[in-house]
Amino acid sequence: MLRPFRVAAFSLASLATAGAALADPPTPPMPAKPKQVVIISFDSARDIPQWKRSRALAQRTGAHFTYFLSCVFLLSPETRKEYTAPGKTPGKSNIGFAASKQEVAERLEQIGLAAHEGHDVASHACGHFDGKDWNQADWLKEFASFEHILENAYAINGIAAEPPGWRDFARHAVVGFRAPYLSTGKALYEALPAAGYRFDASGVSQGPALPAAGNGIMHFSLPQIPEGPESRPVIAMDYNLYVRHSGGFERPRKADAFADRTYQAFRAAFDTQYRGKRIPLELGFHFTLMNDGAYWNALERFAGEVCVKSDVECISFRDYISRQDGSQRQVSVGG
């Protein structure tokens, strides 16, 4: 006869064995989240110190930027009539021209260095005119002016020592566009693929949004993000923040406060995606130091924190679309 305590022990052992046999299989690990993408861009790309400052920021953080270049800044007062905008007389521009031949030479050097370092040089058209009423032929004329002036900038301005590969770069590397004033229309979207562009970054969305393909190109949008004490939405671009903060007038005494508000808005928008769906976050800037550089100061603080994360990539628009099809050929200047 079995002793009672042995029966209990046997029963417990049997239950343990049965439990092991009936246990659920281990849950497979959750798939890793994709890296958070941040796309930082600059419109007009004029001032030489800001070229250098942005490239230095990229070198510190490992970021790659998109520079939307206005081609009038590759023409001096002496060569400005090389450009004729649709419906305008030669030499007209809403944003002026380069100050001198020397300034053009310095800007061309910065463009070449940026391209060599892997940044994306894209088009912001030429004279910064509002093209909402232009037809397709007008847009194609503006695109042709951009390509001609970029490709021939050294020769047009009589600048010696055109670097090897410059013309190949000008013909093939510029694949993106952002419209002045973010002003778009049907004719623009018909002209862009006809001119060989592969992406447009002129849109605005209610929040971070995935780019959408259409009309043969990829469409990106600057998001509206919550900002300020009342979390009111504002387009994630320095000029829009400048208007929000100071009505478009300089208030340098409040620069630190404006920089902090901007940083907080950028960081909150980033954190929402980083902890959530990881939709790419787009941020736009100009080379103008509005409110005593508040928005660039916020950018440097933000990029210095997030672009260095192992699961974050601060990349250009061209980088992003090249990953979608794996076919984008990198074009370098200087061999």
Image (spheres, rainbow, N blue to C red):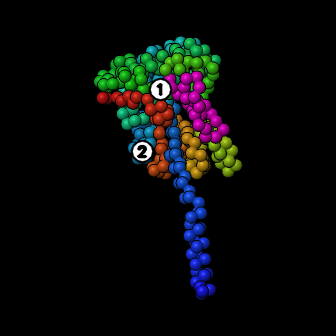
Label 2: which secondary element: loop
Q: Nearer the viewer, residue 7 or 48?
A: 7
Report the label total. 2
Across and down, in percent, residue 198 comes to: 51, 26
- Residue linked to disc 2: 62
Across and down, in percent, residue 159 comes to: 33, 22
Label 1: which secondary element: loop
Magenta-highlighted stretch: main secondary structure? strand
- Residue linked to disc 1: 175
Across and down, in percent, residue 257 comes to: 59, 50
Furthest residue in direction front, as rendered: 1
Left or right, 130 with respect to 335, comes to right
Give the magenta part as a residue range.
197-221
Residue 107: quarter of image: top left
Q: Name which of mark 1 and mark 2 comes first in the sequence.
A: 2
Identify the residue at horizontal 55%, vertical 58% (top origin).
26
Tell me the distance, in whole angstroms, between the alpha carbons under discs 1 and 2: 22 Å
Is residue 221 positioned above or below 167 on the image? below
Residue type at the position of mark 1: Val
Is residue 121 positioned above or below 187 on the image? below
